[in-house]
Amino acid sequence: MYYRKGAHSTYDLKYHIVWCTKYRYRVLTGQIGNRARELVREVCAANYVDIISGSLSPDHVHILVSVPPSLAISKLVQYIKGKSSRKLMQEFRDLSKRFAFKPKSALQA
């Protein structure tokens, strides 16, 4: 077994994280899927998180990560989902048309 070490701790915290796209739309394919994979890797590297294994399906993502004890798992998920969603919406305009919030007033006009 491999243990990671910090300044005052030795740890082996692993989490299996799964999330799906809004309405389970199958959008994580082709260039969008590749870019999503890159964004998850960037966020994990920036937060000293090791990705042990991962899988990207058209409508959901599985990752098994080793996280330092100084980072809450909820914060990691917030960082990954927030950055990937924001960047994918900016880079692929057709996604923002499909998933963007539409107020009632805009639908009636």
Image (cartoon, rainbow, N blue to C red):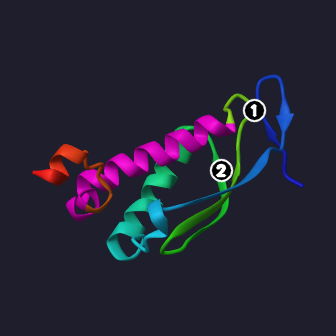
Q: Earlier in the sequence, mark 1 or mark 2?
A: 2
Taken as a whole, is the magenta stretch helix, strand or loop?
Answer: helix
Q: Position of residue 62 (x, y in %)?
A: 63, 64
Q: Which residue is rendered at x = 67% and y = 32% of the image? A: 71
Tell me the quadrant of the picture where the N terminus can be found. Answer: bottom right
Q: Are marks 1 and 2 in contact (CB under 8 Å)?
A: no
Label 1 sits on a secondary structure element that is: loop
Indicate whether residue 109 is drawn in magenta. no
Above or below for 108 versus 11: below
The circle drawn on residue 23 is: none
Query: For numbered disc 2, what is the local secondary structure?
Result: strand
Residues in magenta, as a range: 73-97
Left or right: where 8 falls relative to 46: right
Residue located beneath label 2 in the image: 50
State whether residue 55 is above or below residue 15.
Answer: below
Label 1 environment density (alpha carbons within 10 Å; few <14, some 14–19, many ≥20): few
> Which residue is depicted at the point 34% across and 46% down?
86
